[in-house]
Image (cartoon, rainbow, N blue to C red):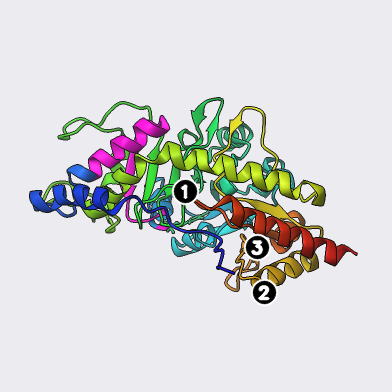
Amino acid sequence: MSKILVTKPFQAPFEEITAEMQRAWDAQWLTNNGPLLKEFEAGLNAYLGTKDCAVVSNGTVAIQVALQALGIKGEVITTPFSYVATTSTIVWEGCTPVFVDIDAKTFNIDPVQIESAITEKTSAILATHVFGVPCDVEAIERIAKTHNLKVIYDAAHCFGTKINGVSVLNYGDLSTLSLHATKLMHSVEGGAIFVNDSSSKVEGLTEPVSPLRYTVNRLRNFGHFGPEVFDGVGINAKNSEIHAAIGLVNLRYADEIMTDRERQHERYDQGLETLALTKPEIAENVDWNKSYYPVVFKSQEEALHVLDGLEACRIYARRYFYPALNTLPYIVRPGKTPNAATISTSILCLPLYFGLEDEKITRVIEEVVRLCNEFRS
Ligand SMILES: *Cc1c(COP(=O)(O)O)cnc(C)c1O
């Protein structure tokens, strides 16, 4: 039996990749916010329906730059159910993560619990739209306005997800996307910061941009404001023309990638129906990108029985996301998050990637059903 991996990177035809890279090679311009990178940014905005997107070197530094750009200090209210980068970036930037529980229906931060966690030290909410399923963005926006807090969304999984036909990346002060090879859309390594600043453009720049976009541009490029002038501390969060070339090619396949996810989800949904596993609830007004196939089992024991049993058949599911982030060894204020504890211990993501064959999905379904029934009987 051949291996079935939880994910595989999307790989466009190599000739297309080399043709696009050739442009950078011929121009002898390989990095430093070159023409391909700008095209990639414009391409992302055009495909997603977003306004202003700054491509950076990865989705983790995107969060770090976002925290810096908004001047976040002190306490940041955040979710315990996400990838480690959501929490590690807060700590790395010298802020304190304050965890509140997730909603058991969406697996996202529960807005009802945000308010009671606010203190005079709170400066921001950093929430993840986990698996590409949107948070309750309206409730979060209301709370942020009332308490004068900034909102950053870790929208790493959100390429293509829409609320009322509008990209979820248009919410929050800043939203960050990951373009890592394992994500639905990628540039091998890469990330992007979506800037939602409608205030007037900064005067005196070669390309007029909003004040917040100007800050992001400065931060990702060492603080440069012209060749010899530095406007504050910056970091190197730039991405290269070579990564942009791959991103540009992959963008051509975005529709195909999204449609293929529909096929795979439908097959899994049908095949696993009898097990009555819990899946994230998708609101009526949401177009979900179906970037992952998460299922919550009845208990941790059941989930681990399935995980181990699948591995014995060379099928590699993953415990996304385990452990809950408030149990990381460097967390001093874990808080109480029972929903996150239950879900993080009993969830598995099943194999899902572009081109995963129907026969392989059927094999996964058959084994999950067999193992689950074996455990339950
Ligand atoms: C992948 C991921 C990141 C980090 O993105 P990189 O591009 O790998 O740095 C951050 N948050 C979440 C939720 C992710 O899944």
Whether residue 145 appears in magenta in the rendering, the answer is: no
Span of residues in magenta:
37-60
Answer with mark 2 or mark 1, whichever residue precedes in sequence.
1
Can you tell which quarter of the image residue 14 is in? bottom left
Residue 320 can be seen in this image: yes
> For residue 297, which numbered disc appears in the image?
none
Answer with mark 2 or mark 3, whichever residue precedes in sequence.
2
> For residue 312, which numbered disc appears in the image?
2
Mark 2: amino acid: Ala
> For residue 184, which numbered disc appears in the image?
1
Answer with mark 3 or mark 1, whichever residue precedes in sequence.
1
Tell me how many marks there are: 3
Q: Residues within 10 Å of mark 3 (few under 14, many from 20)?
A: many
Mark 3: amino acid: Ala
Find out whether the residues at labels 2 and 3 contact each other: C-beta distance under 8 Å: no
**Picture residue at 70% right of the left edge, 59% below the top:** 347
Mark 1: amino acid: Leu
Q: Is residue 276 left or right of residue 365?
A: right
Q: Position of residue 168 (x, y in %)?
A: 51, 35
Quadrant in which the C terminus appears = bottom right
Residue where numbered disc 3 is placed: 324
Q: Is residue 202 above or below residue 64?
A: above
**Picture residue at 38% right of the left edge, 57% below the top:** 61
